[in-house]
Image (cartoon, rainbow, N blue to C red):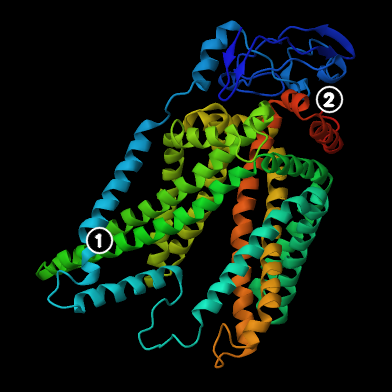
Amino acid sequence: MSHQHYYAANADQQQPIVVVQGTVVSQQPLPVPSSNHYIGSHVPVSAQPYIAPPPPPSQAAVYVSEDKASNPISDTKNMGIVTPFSVQEEYAHERDRGQSRQYRDVPFAVLFIVHLLVMGFACASNSHKLYGKDAGSNDEGRRLLHGSATFISDYIGSRVLDEDQQEGDAIDPDGFISLLIISGVLAFILSALSLSFMTYFAEGLIKTALIVNVIMYGVMALFGFAVGAAGMGFMGLIMFVFAAWYTFKVWDRIPFAAANLKTAITSIRANIGVTIFGYLSLFVLFGWSIAWAITAIVVLDVSADNMEGNEGGEDEELPEVNGVVLFLLLLSFYWTQQVIKNVVHVTVAGTVGTWWFTPKEANSCCSPAVRDSFVRATTYSFGSICFGSLIVAIIEATREMVRQARESDDGILVCLADCCLGCLESIVEYFNMWAYVFVALYGFGFVEAGKNVIQLFKSRGWTTIITDSLISNVLFLICLGVGVITGLLVDLFMMGPIKNGSIFSEDVSSGSALFIAFVIGFLFGYLWSSVLMGTLSSAVSTVIVCYAEAPTEFDQNHPQLSQEMRATWRQAWPIDFKY
């Protein structure tokens, strides 16, 4: 029987050998349980990847746990990690339905596009007011421009415009541009080198990240008690105990997490062109932020002007009406932000999936896998991306409204609401991260992908979360390291021009100038590396899912990495793993 994988065609293949208690019992498919997942690997029926020809028996054998001698094949709980099997003919139509190339969650894609058109129309039809063309003089334009700066500065928590401050002599434009260019180049080079560094020292970095985490909470506790802040001290002490306990419990899982990290790095280095989409997303997000800010300013100004035209007691309705408008604007901002980020995530997951199953299509900088994965993310799966992103955006917009409410009423209920929304936001974002991996691998709709995520956690439990958490700590540590090293190198390279006054005026002390240069270098390093580490994080999630569902294909296509993964898994979970 033949079947079309989401990104590779599958021909008729032989079945892997099944070994029970050291005896070859079958070379036929194992019976499919009624719960619609595959024995041991728990692969959804509609998500079965193709089965490549089996390797020699010594490698292709599927070992069944000997914990239960009676009818071991039918008892899925006593099975080890086994290879996926082709489904029977009665399930073929369901599998093909899940993997066929068709547009998913189309209404949400249409809604997102319509929302962008509405935002664009609002911006185009009102942006001329920023230049005071509707007013008798330029006073109206200046008022709106000042309001723009005030709105943005209040939102990001920093002052953008100060009419009384006169700048111009403090910074030399040419020297400052040189500083930015050097910072960007150094950040790019260090980010690229960090991949090789992580490959060779993956296990040591994971251990370092865990130890640093424990030390930081210990320092927090000591500092809190030293300055008399008992609340900070007790909180730091509790987190210190928890971090130390967590480190002790997961220490034997570190080799397996390191093997996952090495595999993800290898897949990204083989398709390094996929990182371009991550860097391009920065510019797209920057452009969207500017466009949204202009639109938000003019829409809020028009809304305020309309309300000011009302007379009498109707002024009391101003906060409610403006609150609705502001919520919709925030929803637009967060929704688009999430969509841009998740398009990159799905693109990376699709590329890594192709590398896993058909490495010939994913072994160059700009391989066909990179192109095809991006096309799928922006066409067939775009509706699913918009669906999941909308859920997170609603939570984020609501939380932002609650934060604004805290400015006038910092009561316990508002504080609890903010905390609960923050926890809910983190949970939904984490859930979406895994759901989008299934979207990228099999072309599922968002709801169907979510069901597969639930099945993944049922079958793997805390294993998936622990592995992902260990690696996430390393990625954050690398971002900080790249940022600090970039800042120091920028100071080293620019020390001469700074002391000569080629960048800052003589009114700025050398110490202040070096600190500013360090901060700029740190921001560049952290930003560039965070994009690359974000791409790597998507690859890690994909590797975890693929290994949970298709270890045989991994062994056939990448035997050296597979051998290391199996050895570390067996070391961490010797009882459960028999593959």
Lower position in the chain sequence, tag 1 or tag 2: 1
Element type at mark 1: helix
Q: Position of residue 474 (x, y in %)?
A: 72, 54
- In this figure, which residue is indicated by the disc labeled 1? 299
- In this figure, which residue is indicated by the disc labeled 2? 578
Can residue 432 be seen here? The reply is yes
Quadrant position of residue 145: bottom left
Disc 1 residue type (three-letter): Val
| Residue 494 shown left or right of residue 118 in the figure | right
Q: Is residue 552 above or below residue 171?
A: above
| Residue 203 shown left or right of residue 87 in the figure | right
Can residue 224 be seen here? The reply is no
Which quadrant: the C terminus? top right
Element type at mark 2: loop
Q: Position of residue 30 (x, y in %)?
A: 71, 11
Q: Position of residue 1 (x, y in %)?
A: 61, 7
Check disc 1: other Cα within 10 Å, few if <14, some if 14-19, many if 20+. Answer: many
Which residue sits at x=44%, y=24%?
A: 102
Which residue sits at x=53%, y=41%?
A: 432
